[in-house]
Amino acid sequence: MKNVIVKTCKTLLLPVIVYAIFLAVDFDRFSNLSCIYTIFLQSIIPAITAYAVSFGYICGIFDFTVGSRIIISGLVGGILSAQYGMPGLIIGCMTVSILLAAVTGLANWLLKIPSLVLTMALTMIYEIVGKNISGQFSFVSINYDYAYLGAAPYIIIILVLSAAIFYFIYNQTRFSYHMRAVGSNENVAKNSGIRTQLVKWLSFVLGGIFVGISAILTISQSGSMGAQVNLGSVTLFFKPLMGILIALVMQRFCNMTFGIFISQLMINTIFIGLIAIGMPDTFQNVILGFFLLVVMVLSNNIDRVKAFLRKKKNRIAEQPQM
């Protein structure tokens, strides 16, 4: 247990180092404790969204519909909150999210086309649905009395509960091992008796629970939810995806549950830091693309990097001592 805590604390050095860089650039702005607290709070929703994306990613699925499903769920929840208050917001977001996840998973099951192509097409369809739901002004707002879940301490409590649920499913269930088997080699998993298509469908549904939570927190934190078109919702997918990829690289040091949140802390530190020092939006998008590219390269070549470092260490050990 002590070793696990020590390794997890070591991974926390990543966002600390990034923050220290911005602190050196602008000490007056970043020495304020409220800045650290803001970064922490703004890392919560991407982390919970990353938990949602993780289920599909473990199975080898790229699900671009996550952002559009968050938007539709938030829009419906916002509309129902006007009639039924907080129960309408929560039930509306969760019900629509799980239904959309089930539909997306069923389409993946029946159509049997690459998930990247399928979910990209479904994203465009869902965005049109969201646009029609949002009405003339393309957004839905909620009463301030029903928005308290998006603020502390409620959002922190929801994060802890979400992390606990994800930790249990990811580490303590047989279904988690089935997901990893499917993601590692679907044919081998199928020959082992695993119902691979059912596992994939369930991964969508389980992810839908966390998508619904993200929708509740998103509309509660901002007070409104706006529709997106032309694949604008896909941007909600990239930061969680980067968090997952970084967490996978850090798995040798800490559990996936904590690794995802630590990754989101680091990513949000970078982007909030860029905003704080006055970088334009276009440059932020360049950084996002570059950062995603670097993370993808590292995550896909981690075994080669490990092998290279191992060989280098062995060569150094074999050199004669003078």
Image (cartoon, rainbow, N blue to C red):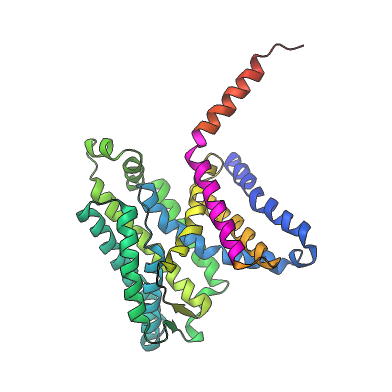
Does residue 197 sit above or below 52 in this rendering? above
Residue 165 spot, x, y in % from top left: 43, 57
Q: Is residue 132 visible?
A: yes
Q: Main secondary structure of the magenta part?
A: helix
Q: Is residue 246 visible?
A: no
In depth, the one of 267 and 285 nearer the eye is 285
In the orientation shown, which residue stands out farthest toward the left? 110
Does residue 157 sit above or below 287 in this rendering? below
In depth, the one of 8 and 248 nearer the eye is 248
Does residue 209 sit above or below 295 in this rendering? below
Image quadrant occupied by the N terminus: top right
Query: In this picture, which residue range is highlighted in magenta?
Result: 282-303
The answer to whether residue 320 is left or right of residue 140 is: right
Q: Choose top left, top right, bottom left or bottom right for residue 274.
A: bottom right
Residue 174 spot, x, y in % from top left: 33, 45
In depth, the one of 44 and 303 nearer the eye is 303
Does residue 165 sit above or below 188 in this rendering? below
Residue drawn 78% across and 57% down?
Answer: 24
Residue 42 spot, x, y in % from top left: 57, 66
Image quadrant occupied by the C terminus: top right
Residue drawn 72% across and 58% down?
Answer: 22
Count numbered badges in the picture. Answer: 0
Residue 119 in magenta? no
Residue 314 spot, x, y in % from top left: 61, 19
Residue 299 in magenta? yes
